[in-house]
Image (cartoon, grey):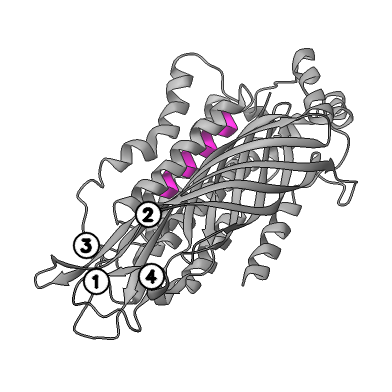
Amino acid sequence: MKKLLFSLLLFCLSGAVRSQNSLAYWRQIITEDSLIQEEMRFNREGIFMPLRGIIQTFTHRSFNRMPGPFRENDHRWGDYGLAFSPLAATWIMKACGIKPRSTNQRMITANGLALSLTVGLSQMLKWGVSEVRPDGSDANSFPSMHAAIAFMGATVLSREYGHISPWITIGGYTAATGTQMLRIGHNAHWMNDVFMGAGIGVVSTHLAYFLTDRFLGRKGIRRMPLSKSELAQLRAWDNHPSGFRLLSGSETNGRTLAVANFAEAAPGFDMTGVTLHTSASLTTGFEAEWFFNNHFFLSAIGRYTISQAKLEIPNPTVTAWGEQLHIYHGNITAGWTAELPNLLGNGGPMRLGVRTLWGVRYNEGVTFHRVAPGRQMGESLLNIKGQLRPEGGAGIVIDMLQSHNQTVGISIDYLHTFGTKFMPDRWVIASSWKAMF
């Protein structure tokens, strides 16, 4: 399954590969006045997100349906504020007189179509799948409408105003990823729900802009050629591509563990045969990356990871409440990267890098309790202590130039935590949006 997922990710990303020297490529675009043609193409960024949601829907089916309810949380409606913030920011900026990439007609048409596709497809899947939420409140869990709207809004914000500053794009996707975290933290969704929702939002938005451009053509797009100063910034990609990344992805491996290896039983509870089952994790964080030259770099990464967990107990009369596992990573990396040769002859420049990671991991302690009659909180059954341990690993990083000062990419890392039997080996697959300095 890991090999399949890895292959799918690379296949989807490969469709956007461009491999000319960045300065030569962008000079060619400006000379040929084809920035508008680039804008009108179907943008395949994020197309792997729904694939990840579909794969996790099948791999998480047994976990989602096994005994172990999650407690109900009544803060769901507040999550809509964060979910709608990227789309609201787009229109607030427009109201303030900041010119977007689109004319009024294109922006209204594309945004309306994106919202219709996102909400319509999400609601159709909710009716068709009827997945019960973790807290058991209803059967509208799959996919997450909040995540779909949040990533739709972030993609709209990026397409309309990302050319002004990459920080606008990073801000939008930070809010969208935060929405995913809130929905998991409030026990409103399973992991596959929020990944599928994100995929629906991103792909629906790109499709909406593509269809709108088929009707309106070039007249819907404002002409915004790169200035001399912006063109000069492209030298960062060729000579010193330092930057700051937003990371958003999944962390997984070792999802079934014998609790006797790392947990403490409450008095009177027999841990024999008790197994901990976890979902794949949702992980997000930031990375500051510094290049010494065009190839060698150092970076500092801080990540937060959340996953859902249930206990499988041989005694059928005992059921434990589902809980969440919280893990924090702090890593320093060193690596080497280079621009790839012309392989597909389509798109903008692309870099492939390898790196080694070293740092620490801290997992919060968590206590599992019995589900008492009436869905009340019963006595504690076992406790997993918090641990701070060293970790190390290696990985690859792929970057694709999106504009004069922004990249999108993916990283695949393996991390091993030393001195513990609690999830010692982890694979991290993350999307990234990078603002170059």
- Position of residue 356 measured from the top left corner of the image (x, y, whole percent): 71, 48
Q: Quadrant of the N terminus?
A: bottom right
Residue kind at label 1, given as amino acid type: Ala
Residue 154 among magenta residues: yes
Which label is found at residue 220?
A: none
Number of numbered discs on residues: 4
Give the residue displayed 22% in from the left and 52% down from the top.
Answer: 73
Q: Residues within 10 Å of mark 2 (few under 14, many from 20)?
A: few
- Position of residue 6 measured from the top left corner of the image (x, y, whole percent): 67, 63
Give the residue displayed 53% in from the left and 16% down from the top.
Answer: 98
Callout 3–callout 1 Cβ contact below 8 Å? no
Q: Which residue is mark 1?
A: 320
Q: Sequence-wise, which precedes: disc 1 or disc 4?
A: 4
Q: Sequence-wise, which precedes: disc 1 or disc 2?
A: 1
Locate residue 90 relative to residue 123 in the image: left or right. right
Callout 2–callout 4 Cβ contact below 8 Å? no
Q: Sequence-wise, which precedes: disc 3 or disc 2?
A: 3
Question: Nearer the observer, disc 2 or disc 4?
Answer: 2
Which label is found at residue 137?
A: 3
Q: Which residue is mark 2?
A: 386
C-alpha span from label 1 to label 2: 20 Å
Q: Residues within 10 Å of mark 4 (few under 14, many from 20)?
A: some
**SS type, badge 2:** loop
Question: Nearer the observer, disc 3 or disc 2?
Answer: 2
Q: Which residue is mark 4?
A: 129
Q: Which residues are magenta?
A: 147-160
Residue kind at label 4, given as amino acid type: Val
Residue kind at label 2, given as amino acid type: Gly
